[in-house]
Image (spheres, rainbow, N blue to C red):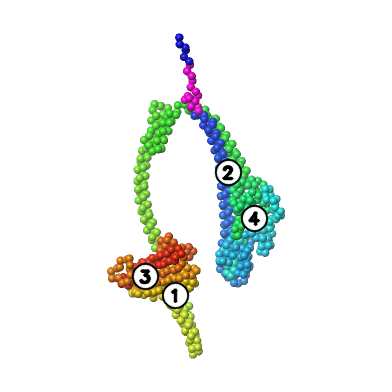
């Protein structure tokens, strides 16, 4: 007789579908999610701290720009005043002191003084800004004035700068009892016969610090009870601040903590961290303030009270944890109930979506035999995927058509823009050339008027003297020769300004004679630059180019050469017959002429050579217009010639002009 069969053993918890579903349902909310929440909260707290540090760093940038703007505005005001017409008049007259006092009040300065050349030279040894002004440049910077310097300008300034030091927790120990120096926005600018110097004392300048604080921390800009503060330090002493010791008592004379001093003043680094400020902890930012010598003389600080943000962070953490626990208490029962029988269709739908994401728009969930909600969702998903496939096809068609139209419109717009840019450049060049011609003609006209008066008066004097004029014959001849020289120069200026009125391109011109006539126009520029000129002229033929236009080209090349040799050098101008080597000669053409203008200047790199003839391209940012060489090339091309340049850094520059002979020009 056989033994009864043993009852079947129930499978282990983890091996049943139910067990696996329970594990799947309970493992994330009870174990993984709390771990993730803890990491997330910790990361959030760190990010919150980083956001506060980034915020105070941005606010320090605003405060820095405000202080720099104050220095810049003071410098600009002094510079404008030094070059004003009123200053020009009073520098040579009387009443300068009263006028300067009125301007000081108007500009909000604490002192404004005029230093003659000798006094300015002595003061320049102490103050770099005055040295810069003596050199012809305006300058403004932060400087530290001793009590004696302040008292010499106004005893009230020395009294305002003096601060009694207040014992401060965590500060570096000191035996000093007071700070008598003053931090001054110091500005100087050139003035007629000397230097104009002004300054604004920042000690106890509460209006400046309150304005900075309002700019950095506008009303309502901080949450809760947090307060924004700003401070300017001289060394480690607060000389201007809105930090309070008590309700309405500002913390003037208190000192910064030793940790901040060591990092900012001693090491020159920026402090971005929490710091103890007078009597509480603040999220703080400090940066060193440097004087005109580059020495660290103080600090600029902005910050806000940390306590409200810390309390808000704690409240947020408590609320997040409480919300998580509430959600967990509600979700676990729901998850246990929903975990049964849903994974197969969901996995099918997930797989279909995954295939669609991978690019297979024909994928479908294909869940059959289910009439419940999941089955209906699967059917809807398949319908949506079909619609998505059809819309994708249409969108691709539309995208192709749109790309074609955009490309077509883009090409049209680019062509139109190129035409507009070319037309604009031509208009600007024409307008500027017309303005230059009018100015030059006006100058020549204004010279002719007084010259005619001088000539007439010389004739009157000669007639009045009668026979006695014979003893002054040499002097009269000398004056007459100089007047004639000026007449010639004015005539050349008029030909230069209005070439169309003196155009004579129908006949040939000797280029060597044009070169010689050009030299007096640029002699003063070349002599001032210490340039030695060598003329090697043997053109041997005539060119049909308008003499004035050729002269304009030569003047531009010679002035450019002088500017390339500020310390002096050699300029060689050479003319020779052009044999036309490497170019096909025109039928019946006469031999042309080749003119070279070579200097021993600094030369040009290849990237400059490639653009040297472009309109408005210039390497003289503050002086040049970038039109000279472009106009020169246009004039030469219009005459049927060409211009080329060879240059390399340190090897000078060589410009070569080739012009056709008279037969080629007149045809």
Task: Identify the element where label 4 is drawn.
Answer: strand
Frontmost residue, 599 versus 84:
599
The first of marks 1 and 2 along the sequence is 2
Going from the N terminus, do you reach mark 3 or mark 4 first? 4
Query: Which residue shows up at 35% across the image and 68% down it?
Result: 641
Task: Point out the stretch of residues depicted in magenta.
Answer: 7-23
Label whose residue precedes the other's in the sequence (3 or 1)? 1
Horizontal and vertical percent for residue 346?
43, 31
Foreground label between 1 and 2: 1
| Disc on res. 234 | 4
Q: Is residue 195 left or right of residue 413?
A: right
Q: Which mark is residue 49?
A: 2
For the residues labelled 3 and 2, the Cα–Cα distance comes to 75 Å
Pointer 3 with pointer 4, Cβ within 8 A: no
The percent coordinates of residue 187 (x first, y second) are 59, 62
Q: Quadrant of the C terminus?
A: bottom left
Q: Where is mark 1, residue-wise? A: 520
């Amino acid at each position: 007789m056989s033994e009864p069969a043993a009852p079947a053993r129930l499978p282990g918890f983890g091996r049943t579908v139910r067990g696996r579903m329970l594990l799947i349902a309970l493992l994330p909310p009870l174990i993984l999610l709390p771990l993730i929440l803890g990491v997330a909260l910790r990361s959030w707290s760190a990010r919150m701290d980083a956001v506060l540090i980034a915020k105070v760093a941005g606010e320090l940038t605003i405060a820095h720009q405000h202080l720099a703007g104050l220095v810049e505005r003071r410098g600009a005001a002094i510079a404008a005043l030094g070059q004003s017409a009123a200053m020009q008049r009073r520098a040579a007259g009387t009443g300068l002191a009263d006028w300067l006092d009125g301007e000081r009040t108007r500009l909000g300065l604490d002192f404004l003084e005029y230093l003659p050349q000798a006094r300015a030279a002595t003061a320049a040894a102490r103050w770099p800004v005055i040295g810069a002004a003596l050199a012809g440049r305006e300058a403004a910077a932060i400087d530290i004035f001793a009590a004696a310097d302040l008292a010499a300008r106004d005893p009230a300034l020395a009294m305002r700068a003096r601060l009694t030091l207040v014992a401060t927790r965590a500060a570096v120990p000191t035996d000093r009892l007071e700070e008598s120096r003053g931090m001054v926005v110091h500005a100087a600018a050139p003035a007629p016969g000397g230097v104009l110097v002004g300054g604004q004392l920042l000690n106890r300048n509460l209006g400046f610090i309150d304005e900075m604080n309002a700019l950095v921390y506008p009303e309502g800009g901080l949450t809760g009870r947090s307060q924004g503060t700003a401070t300017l330090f001289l060394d480690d002493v607060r000389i201007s601040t809105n930090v309070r010791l008590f309700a309405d008592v500002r913390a003037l004379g208190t000192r910064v903590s030793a940790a901040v001093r060591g990092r900012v003043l001693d090491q020159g680094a920026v402090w971005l961290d929490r710091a103890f400020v007078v009597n509480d902890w603040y999220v703080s930012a400090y940066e060193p303030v440097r004087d005109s010598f580059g020495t660290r003389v103080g600090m600029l600080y902005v910050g806000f009270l940390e306590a409200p943000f810390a309390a808000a962070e704690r409240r947020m953490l408590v609320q997040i944890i409480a919300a998580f626990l509430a959600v967990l208490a509600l979700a676990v029962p729901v998850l246990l109930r929903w975990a049964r029988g849903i994974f197969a269709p969901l996995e099918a739908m997930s797989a279909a979506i995954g295939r669609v994401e991978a690019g297979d728009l024909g994928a479908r969930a294909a869940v059959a035999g289910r009439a419940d909600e999941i089955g209906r969702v699967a059917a809807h998903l398949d319908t949506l995927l079909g619609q998505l496939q059809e819309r994708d096809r249409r969108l691709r068609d539309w995208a192709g058509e749109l790309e074609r139209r955009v490309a077509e419109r883009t090409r049209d717009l680019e062509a139109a823009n190129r035409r507009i840019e070319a037309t604009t450049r031509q208009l600007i060049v024409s307008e500027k050339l017309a303005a230059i011609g009018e100015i030059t003609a006006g100058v020549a006209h204004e010279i002719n008027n007084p010259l005619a008066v001088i000539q007439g008066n010389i004739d009157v004097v000669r007639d009045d003297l009668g026979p006695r004029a014979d003893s002054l014959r040499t002097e009269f001849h000398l004056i007459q020769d100089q007047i004639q020289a000026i007449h010639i120069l004015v005539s050349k200026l008029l030909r230069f300004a209005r070439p169309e009125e003196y155009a004579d391109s129908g006949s040939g011109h000797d280029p060597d004679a044009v070169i010689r006539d050009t030299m007096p126009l640029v002699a003063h520029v070349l002599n001032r630059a210490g340039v030695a000129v060598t003329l090697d002229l043997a053109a041997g033929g005539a060119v049909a180019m308008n003499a004035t236009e050729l002269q304009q080209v030569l003047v531009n090349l010679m002035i450019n050469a002088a500017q390339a040799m500020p310390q002096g050098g050699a300029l060689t101008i050479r003319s020779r017959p052009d044999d036309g080597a490497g170019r096909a000669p025109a039928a019946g053409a006469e031999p042309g002429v080749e003119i070279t203008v070579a200097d021993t200047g600094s030369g040009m790199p290849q990237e400059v050579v490639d653009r040297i003839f472009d309109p408005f391209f210039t390497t003289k940012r503050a002086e040049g217009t970038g039109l000279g060489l472009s106009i020169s090339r246009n004039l030469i091309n219009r005459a049927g010639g060409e211009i080329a340049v060879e240059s390399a850094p340190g090897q000078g520059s060589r410009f070569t002009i080739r012009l056709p002979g008279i037969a080629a020009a007149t045809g």
